[in-house]
Image (spheres, grey):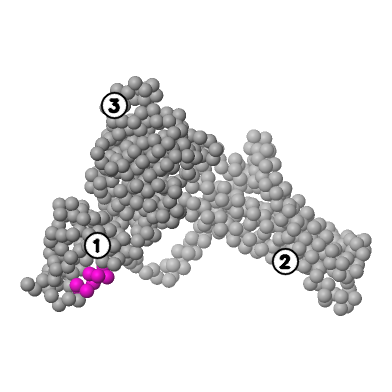
């Protein structure tokens, strides 16, 4: 890869409380690529994602986002850096008490000095981009699972972040909705030039979107490479995953 | 050439848009009709910048200006196409309703609340009665667990508040009774006030705030997270399963807590009697015993049982009314506490009148 690395992880060891889940994990994610983190349940996928987005602090190691050392940044600067990443949570994490439009407007209202008219236009535009042009005034509880994820995606891409993290975007969705969400992620990558880190264990979804695969097994990287390389890998857990 | 050429900055993102807007505003007032927005130096344009530039160009056109974009790179042109602003239609205002229609709607709503609560009341009592004879429905361990949570865990706070109430009652009345040399009647006043009025009322208010809110929040959370639906589809009625053990626990625990509050309140009064009014402990308690009739004790107990039912019904009713997510739970919990305290005070007044004018005489 000749592109520059937007995410760089060096010797990351981390977990919850005192339980070590990730052991000495190192990898890079390059500009414009889609890296899929996969592995069996409990292997540390979501834990790794939480470290990358600053929700968990590792026991040791380094994380560079857009060239900044995330762990040594002062809190205020880290918050500013966080505006440059978008996160699509597993359940959408929309605020249930406000409308979809108000949810998407949060990043604009909190991080910019834009006027309300312009914010409203941007919100509508982002909802149109994710295929929800008529859902603006609905409450999250009035949306289906797939629509909720799309609305959450509209919020995640509000400020055109160069990096988007997605936790199990296809989980709990029917194959048609999951495929359309995958296509949407590919379109957004193409349109906005985003770099995507996607955590999933849906095999069909991986085949559709992954440029490279990072396979975690018991907290360690068991494989890092393209889909073709993964299919030919001699690593036992990788072989088991693709041919259960 | 009769055109204004405005060079746009290198970066137009959500960060630069507010300052760019104030810079471009002067173009609206410029008498020249033709405006050229020069994109020659623009290399970073995000969705906010793209929407802003195109919306602003539309504003200029509405002000009878001719606007041209020049010097765009392929990337910038692509971004502008991708993020073309969407015209918004002004939301239509709902028609204002006639005041009589609103009064009627509101009366109808209150009526339906009343009927719903009556149905719930009847259901709970039906199940409470049935469960009494069916061992399986009684869930004894849950009754004990609830009894500990509602009663034992509230002992400290109920005791502390009752002590302070008894103390203050005695202090306030002592100042007046002293003038007439009627110090000993402080004991009568504290005993009657605590047992027939303050004890049951204060205990019920504390339990409504502490346990009533917990019951509402628990049921509301179960409702919004579909746990109640899960019970229903398993063929388990949530009323006998969840509510009846709480009703049994409250019916047992609230009268006991009330008796406890009464005793501690009287002790609070005795502290003032002994320290401030120089009454000996023994005469104080002899006076307390002599003044109390069964009627006061009976009144207090009837009140505490009634309050237990009110707290449970209100908490359950609001819990089942929860809609939406976390905010819905918060709303019904607040409403439940306010309504419980209100209904407890209303019931206290009604029972007070009944016992004063027409209660049993012992």
Residue at which label 3 appears: A229
Q: Are marks 1 and 3 on the same chain?
A: no
Q: Nearer the viewer, residue B265 or A16?
A: A16
**Magenta extent:** B21-28
Subunit bearing disc 1: B
**Mark 2 burial class by Cα count in 10 Å: few <14, some 14-19, many 20+:** few
Residue A92, visible in the rendered structure: no
- Residue designated by label 1: B52
Whether residue A51 appears in magenta in the rendering, the answer is: no
Q: Residue furthest left?
A: B1
How far from the left and from the top, in percent, is residue A73?
43, 51
Q: Give whichever of B215, B46 is nearer the camera.
A: B46
Give the mark nearer the N terminus: 1 vs 2: 1
Q: Quadrant of the N terminus of chain A?
A: top left
Please determine whether, in this image, residue A116 is positioned above or below residue B229.
below
**Picture quarter containing residue A18?**
top right
Question: Disc 2 marks which residue?
Answer: B353
Position of residue B272 measured from the top left corner of the image (x, y, whole percent): 84, 67
Front of the two marks 1 and 2: 1
Q: Chain of mark 3?
A: A
């Amino acid at each position: 890869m000749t592109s520059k690395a937007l995410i760089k992880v060096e010797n990351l060891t981390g977990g919850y409380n005192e339980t070590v889940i990730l052991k000495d994990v190192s990898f890079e994610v390059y500009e414009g690529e889609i890296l899929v983190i996969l592995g069996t349940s409990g292997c540390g996928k979501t834990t790794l994602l939480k470290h990358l987005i600053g929700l968990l602090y590792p026991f040791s190691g380094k994380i560079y986002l857009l060239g900044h050392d995330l762990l040594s940044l002062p809190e205020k600067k880290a918050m500013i850096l966080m505006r440059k990443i978008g996160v699509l949570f597993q359940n959408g994490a929309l605020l249930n008490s406000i409308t979809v439009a108000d949810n998407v407007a949060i990043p604009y209202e909190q991080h910019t000095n834009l006027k309300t008219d312009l914010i409203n236009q941007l919100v509508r535009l982002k909802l149109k981009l994710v295929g929800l042009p008529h859902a603006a005034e609905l409450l999250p509880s009035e949306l289906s699972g797939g629509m909720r994820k799309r609305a959450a995606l509209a919020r995640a891409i509000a400020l055109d972040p160069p990096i988007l993290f997605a936790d199990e975007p296809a989980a709990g969705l029917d194959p048609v909705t999951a495929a359309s969400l995958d296509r949407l992620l590919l379109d957004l990558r193409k349109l906005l030039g985003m770099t995507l880190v996607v955590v999933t264990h849906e095999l069909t979804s991986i085949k559709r979107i992954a440029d490279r695969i990072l396979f975690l097994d018991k907290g360690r990287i068991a494989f890092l490479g393209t889909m073709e390389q993964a299919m030919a890998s001699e690593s036992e857990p990788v072989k088991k995953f693709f041919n259960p | 050439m009769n055109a204004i050429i405005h060079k746009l900055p290198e970066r137009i993102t959500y960060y630069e848009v507010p300052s760019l807007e104030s810079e471009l505003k002067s173009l609206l007032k410029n008498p020249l009709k033709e405006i050229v927005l020069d994109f020659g130096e623009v290399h970073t344009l995000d969705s906010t910048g793209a929407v802003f530039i195109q919306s602003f160009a539309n504003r200029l056109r509405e002000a009878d200006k001719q606007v041209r974009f020049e010097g765009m790179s392929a990337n910038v042109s692509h971004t502008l196409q991708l993020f073309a602003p969407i015209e918004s239609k002004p939301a239509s205002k709902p028609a204002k309703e006639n005041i009589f229609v609103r009064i009627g709607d509101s009366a109808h709503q209150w009526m339906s609340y009343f009927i719903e609560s009556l149905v719930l009341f009847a259901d709970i009592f039906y199940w409470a009665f049935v469960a009494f004879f069916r061992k399986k429905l009684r869930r004894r361990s849950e009754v004990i667990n609830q009894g500990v949570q509602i009663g034992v865990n509230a002992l400290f706070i109920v005791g502390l508040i009752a002590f302070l109430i008894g103390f203050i009652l005695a202090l306030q009345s002592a100042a007046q009774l002293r003038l007439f040399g009627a110090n000993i009647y402080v004991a009568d006043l504290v005993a009657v006030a605590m047992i027939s009025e303050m004890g049951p009322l204060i205990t019920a208010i504390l339990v409504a705030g502490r346990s009533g809110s917990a019951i509402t929040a628990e049921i509301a959370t179960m409702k919004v997270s579909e746990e109640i639906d899960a019970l229903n589809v398993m063929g388990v009625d949530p009323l006998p399963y969840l509510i009846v053990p709480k009703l049994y626990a409250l019916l047992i625990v609230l009268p006991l807590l009330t008796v406890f509050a009464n005793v501690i309140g009287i002790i609070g009064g005795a502290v003032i009697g002994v320290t401030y009014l120089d009454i000996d402990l023994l005469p104080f308690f002899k006076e307390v015993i002599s003044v109390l009739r069964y009627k006061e004790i009976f009144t207090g107990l009837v009140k505490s049982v009634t309050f237990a039912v009110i707290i449970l019904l209100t908490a359950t009713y609001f819990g089942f009314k929860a809609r939406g997510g976390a905010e819905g739970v918060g709303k019904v919990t607040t409403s439940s506490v306010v309504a419980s305290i209100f209904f407890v005070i209303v019931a206290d007044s009604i029972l007070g009148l009944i016992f004063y004018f027409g209660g049993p005489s012992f």
